[in-house]
């Protein structure tokens, strides 16, 4: 069964069970400073899991584009992906364990025709914070899962929370038996031997974990589920890896045809990073030296490095991009719509990286000349790391050049330095939900409202070409990215600042209406990321000044927000400017 068929079956199944199908949120999160990318289906829905009313109701389902950066260096093996698609269904204070489990079981066994004997499940074993989840286990028995296919595990395995704090709760996970031989007499879903593969996770959100580590009961019980599409397609098609499915095979086959050096790991890296890069670019991402731009730069450059390793001419990149878009356009129409942009961004980054390689070789020559004068035959790990960290020069290229000069590299020292670098990088990319959508207090709500005032002020001062490209809010400040071709003048910045403060002083009333997306457009509301909206939306109006489609929340009057002060205006990426501002009370 193809991935697109699985996705359609899933959405149709939950539609029949009275779920509203909502669009995927963009990969680049809106108003969430806690993550670089959308990492899970529940992430954009946090305000609704905490009790805010969703315009589409209490039962929702979607497919969500996700990107996780923790395992970039692991991509190339038979299972790791950075970009993936998550199918999910939610109950926002509606059904709970029994109905959720029944629907999951019915979808797997009836829609996907998976034999019951292929399924095993795990439930929460219980601890001081929450009792043993015998309710879920009993429902599983009732629907038809044999008792010896039900396992209990602790928080490490059967408790779900995104990061250190926020909505959370016990989960029940569903595993597929691949038919591989058991690793021991005690082989079970907790094993990493490959016999059992997790396919679906049903999280029962009953708690909120506070900053101090304590748990409080949520007023609204929620269900949040996630089913990985690539993994499900792989299993149902009887394939060994996601790279053997139709999502990757055309590009994998083309790479095999073009390569002069046979390397399955490099082919996988190129295919995976190409798809991920295209998805980020189509959602507005651009390469840079910071944050998500840096992740995109890493993905593109790692892909180019492995094209070089396969000895594939880089002039083939355009054809590979077009082939991948053709392969994926049925699932992601935005790729075809943004084809020219995707090609130009990747090719521009390729040119920059080629120059980097030239610079790196020049620096390498300087280092080697010094070492030869000292009659040394080994290049220190710190030099290899400096070439990598400062010049973006790949360590494997340093190794090859060293061998050509009759030298070796101190790989052990490099690996230690690289590991420290990786840990720092991981810590940066894993800040999940710290001060993000889960943290809705008076300050963040004021900043959220301020982005609306800023957006409209920019449009009035600079022109209607200004569109929001993303925002980032904490308790201390706001960051706002918008389309504009050049640096703003001091006079323009002062006008924008004055205009925002004028609206705050007017103490404008903020109102919210629910309406159809079409009615919202007709009313003149500004909409961001058009494809992300469902049939019904919330429109926030700030007096006679601003009207915008948004999930909320906002202040009720502008008067208490404080004084708006622009701290910095800078370039974010090509054609996109960034403003950092604060509210002073």
Image: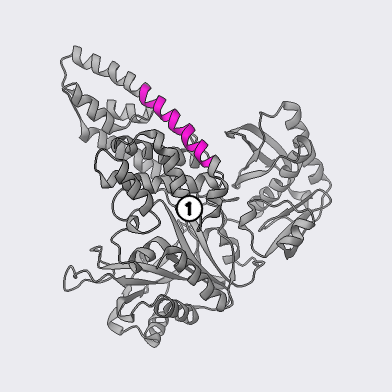
Vertical comparison of 479 with 376: above or below: below
Majority secondary structure of the magenta segment?
helix
Relative to 466, 71 lies left or right: left
* Residue placed furthest toward the front: 257
Vertical comparison of 450 with 104: above or below: above
Residue 163 vs residue 3, the one in the foreground: 3
Picture quarter with the N terminus: bottom left
Q: Is residue 439 magenta?
A: no
Residue 152 is situated, as x and y percent measured from the top left of the image, at: 32, 75
Picture residue at 37% right of the left edge, 62% below the top: 231
Vertical comparison of 172 with 471: above or below: below
Vertical comparison of 138 with 163: above or below: below
Q: Secondary structure under badge 1? A: loop
Q: Is residue 351 magenta?
A: yes
Residue 30 is situated, as x and y percent measured from the top left of the image, at: 59, 51
* Residue placed furthest toward the bottom: 142
Relative to 491, 71 lies left or right: left
Picture residue at 48% right of the left edge, 65% below the top: 87
Instruction: Please report the bounds of the magenta region as a residue range.
Output: 341-358
Relative to 528, 266 lies left or right: left
Residue 258 is situated, as x and y percent measured from the top left of the image, at: 32, 41
Residue 321 is situated, as x and y percent measured from the top left of the image, at: 45, 43
Picture residue at 33% right of the left edge, 27% below the top: 386
Q: Which residue is mark 1?
A: 432
Residue 36 appears in view: no
**Rendered image quadrant of residue 499:** top right
* Residue density around tag 1, few if under 14, some if 14–19, many if 20 or more, within 10 Å: many
Residue 325 appears in view: yes
Picture quarter with the C terminus: top right
Picture residue at 30% right of the left edge, 30% below the top: 385
């Amino acid at each position: 069964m193809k991935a697109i068929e699985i996705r359609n079956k899933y959405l149709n199944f939950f539609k029949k069970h009275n779920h509203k199908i909502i669009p995927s949120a963009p990969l680049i999160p809106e108003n969430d400073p806690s993550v670089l990318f959308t990492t899970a289906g529940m992430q954009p829905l946090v305000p609704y899991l905490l009790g805010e009313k969703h315009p589409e109701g209490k039962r929702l389902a979607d497919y969500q584009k996700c990107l996780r950066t923790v395992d970039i260096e692991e991509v190339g093996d038979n299972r790791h992906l950075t970009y993936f698609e998550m199918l999910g269904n939610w109950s926002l204070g509606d059904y709970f364990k029994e109905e959720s489990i029944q629907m999951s079981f019915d979808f797997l066994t009836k829609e996907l025709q998976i034999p019951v004997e292929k399924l095993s499940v795990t439930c929460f074993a219980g601890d001081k914070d929450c009792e043993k989840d015998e309710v879920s286990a009993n429902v599983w028995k009732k629907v038809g899962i044999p008792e010896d296919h039900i396992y209990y595990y602790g928080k490490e395995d059967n408790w779900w929370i995104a990061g250190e704090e926020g909505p959370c709760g016990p989960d029940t996970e569903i595993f597929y038996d691949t038919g591989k031989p058991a690793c021991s007499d005690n082989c079970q879903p907790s094993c990493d031997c490959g016999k059992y593969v997790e396919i679906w996770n049903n999280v029962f959100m009953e708690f909120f974990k506070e900053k101090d580590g304590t748990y409080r009961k949520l007023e609204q019980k929620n269900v949040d589920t996630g089913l990985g599409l690539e993994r499900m397609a792989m299993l149902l098609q009887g394939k060994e890896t996601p790279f053997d499915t139709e999502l990757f095979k055309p590009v994998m086959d083309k790479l095999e045809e073009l390569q002069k050096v046979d390397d399955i790991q490099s082919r996988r890296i190129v295919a995976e990073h190409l798809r991920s890069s295209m998805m980020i670019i189509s959602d507005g991402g651009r390469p840079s030296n910071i944050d998500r731009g840096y992740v995109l730069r890493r993905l593109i450059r790692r892909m180019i490095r492995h094209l070089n390793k396969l000895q594939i001419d880089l002039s083939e990149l355009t054809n590979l991009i077009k082939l991948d878009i053709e392969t994926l356009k049925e699932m992601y129409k935005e790729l075809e719509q943004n084809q020219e942009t995707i090609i130009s961004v990747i090719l521009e980054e390729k040119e920059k990286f080629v120059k980097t390689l030239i610079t790196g070789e020049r620096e390498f020559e300087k280092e080697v000349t010094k070492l030869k004068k000292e009659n040394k035959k080994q290049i220190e790990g710190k030099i290899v790391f400096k070439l990598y960290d400062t010049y973006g020069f790949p360590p494997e290229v340093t190794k090859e050049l060293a061998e050509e000069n009759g030298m070796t590299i101190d790989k052990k020292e490099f690996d230690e330095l690289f590991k420290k670098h990786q840990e720092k990088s991981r810590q940066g990319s894993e800040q999940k939900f710290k001060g993000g959508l889960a943290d809705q207090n008076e300050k963040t709500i004021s900043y959220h409202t301020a982005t609306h005032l800023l957006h409209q002020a920019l449009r009035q001062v600079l022109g209607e070409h200004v569109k929001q490209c993303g925002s980032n809010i904490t308790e201390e400040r706001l960051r706002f990215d918008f389309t504009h071709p050049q640096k703003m003048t001091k006079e323009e910045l002062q006008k924008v600042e004055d205009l925002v403060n004028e609206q705050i002083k007017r103490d404008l009333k903020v109102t919210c209406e629910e309406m159809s997306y079409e009615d919202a457009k007709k009313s003149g509301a500004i909409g961001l990321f058009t494809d992300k909206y469902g049939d019904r939306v919330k429109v926030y109006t700030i007096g006679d000044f601003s009207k915008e489609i948004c999930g909320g929340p906002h202040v009720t009057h502008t008067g208490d927000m404080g004084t708006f002060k622009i701290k910095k205006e800078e370039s974010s990426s090509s054609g996109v400017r960034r403003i950092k501002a604060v509210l002073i009370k």
